Image (spheres, rainbow, N blue to C red):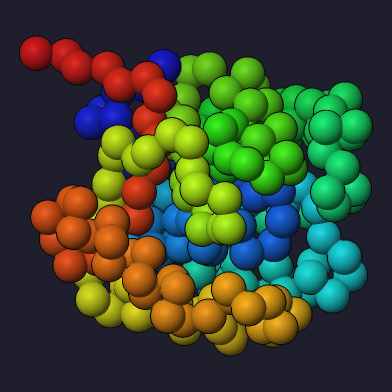
């Protein structure tokens, strides 16, 4: 377990790992944080794993990831887990994450779905993240949905105005396959960032669940 205040992301070889059950999960839940991290730490390596994607959505995922993270420090991999059936594919997913752990540098920070998420794919991947990266700071991001979250956020990342706007624009421009969903629009994404901003006493913010926080006086 690594203290949240001691990530040392500018050290040589420092890396962050982003885990998504589906294309656009990271962008929805933590896109502003990713943009902020990439801008603040230009040498930071960013590994991005998407567990499941159709060919069309894989193309969207690749384009979106490169829009959020510039340069060759981005290392994206996309798996073939069955969308909507992650509980039955638990063994496959665990092996995929163990392979990922073995071939990428030990991350200082892992951003993953919440293991309390009501979507079964998100919950499985979130649980496996905690099992696989025990020495990293693991933060669970939020994805708005019809079902209310069962565990509230307890850690917030403030976002500058331009970062919040950039996140919403990239979600619109890089995930066209999702535009037919009634909830997938700029109004929802901005409203969610604004609500978390109120809770963080700022204008815009993203919320995370930090289940283990370490305070060192």
Q: Name the side, left or right, on which 140 lies relative to 105.
A: left
Quadrant in the picture for the N terminus: top left
Q: Which residue is drawn at 87% across and 65% down?
A: 54
Quadrant in the picture for the C terminus: top left
Q: How many marks?
A: 0
- Nearer to me, 67 or 57: 57
Residue 79 at least partly seen: no
Q: Position of residue 179 (x, y in %)?
A: 67, 83
Residue 143 at least partly seen: yes
Q: Residue at x 69, y 62 (%)?
A: 23
- Nearer to me, 114 or 118: 118
Q: Where is residue 204 in the image (x, y as percent from the top left)?
A: 25, 65
Q: Name the side, left or right, on which 193 lies relative to 89.
A: left
Q: Name the side, left or right, on which 177 lies relative to 158.
A: right
- Nearer to me, 127 or 99: 127
Query: In this rendering, is residue 2 above or below 138?
Result: above
- Nearer to me, 82 or 13: 82
Q: Which residue lies furthest to the top in this view?
A: 217
Snapshot quadrant of residue 166 = bottom left
Q: Which residue lies furthest to the front in this view?
A: 147
Q: Position of residue 145 (x, y in %)?
A: 57, 58
Query: In this rendering, is residue 135 above or below 178?
Result: above
Q: Which residue is drawn at 30% across and 36% down?
A: 154
Q: Residue at x 43, y 34 (%)?
A: 151
Query: In this rendering, is residue 167 above or below 133?
Result: below
Snapshot quadrant of residue 36 = bottom left
């Amino acid at each position: 377990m690594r203290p949240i205040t001691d990530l040392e992301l500018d050290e040589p070889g420092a890396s962050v790992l982003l885990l998504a059950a589906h294309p656009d999960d990271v962008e929805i839940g933590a896109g502003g944080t990713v943009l902020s991290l990439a801008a603040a730490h230009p040498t930071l390596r960013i590994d991005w794993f998407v567990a499941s994607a159709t060919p069309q959505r894989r193309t969207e995922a690749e384009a979106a990831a490169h829009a959020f993270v510039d340069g060759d420090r981005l290392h994206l991999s996309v798996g073939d887990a069955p969308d909507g059936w992650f509980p039955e594919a638990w063994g496959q997913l665990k092996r995929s994450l163990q392979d990922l752990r073995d071939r990428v540098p030990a991350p200082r920070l892992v951003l993953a779905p919440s293991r309390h998420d009501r979507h079964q794919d998100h919950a499985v991947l979130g649980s496996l993240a905690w099992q696989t990266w025990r020495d990293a700071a693991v933060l669970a991001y939020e994805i708005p949905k019809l079902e209310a979250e069962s565990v509230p956020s307890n850690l917030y990342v403030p976002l500058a105005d331009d970062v919040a706007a950039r996140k919403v624009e990239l979600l619109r421009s890089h995930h066209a396959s999702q535009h037919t969903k009634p909830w997938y629009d700029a109004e929802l994404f901005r409203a969610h960032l604004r609500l978390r901003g109120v809770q963080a006493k700022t204008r815009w913010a993203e919320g995370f669940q930090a289940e283990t926080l370490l305070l060192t006086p």
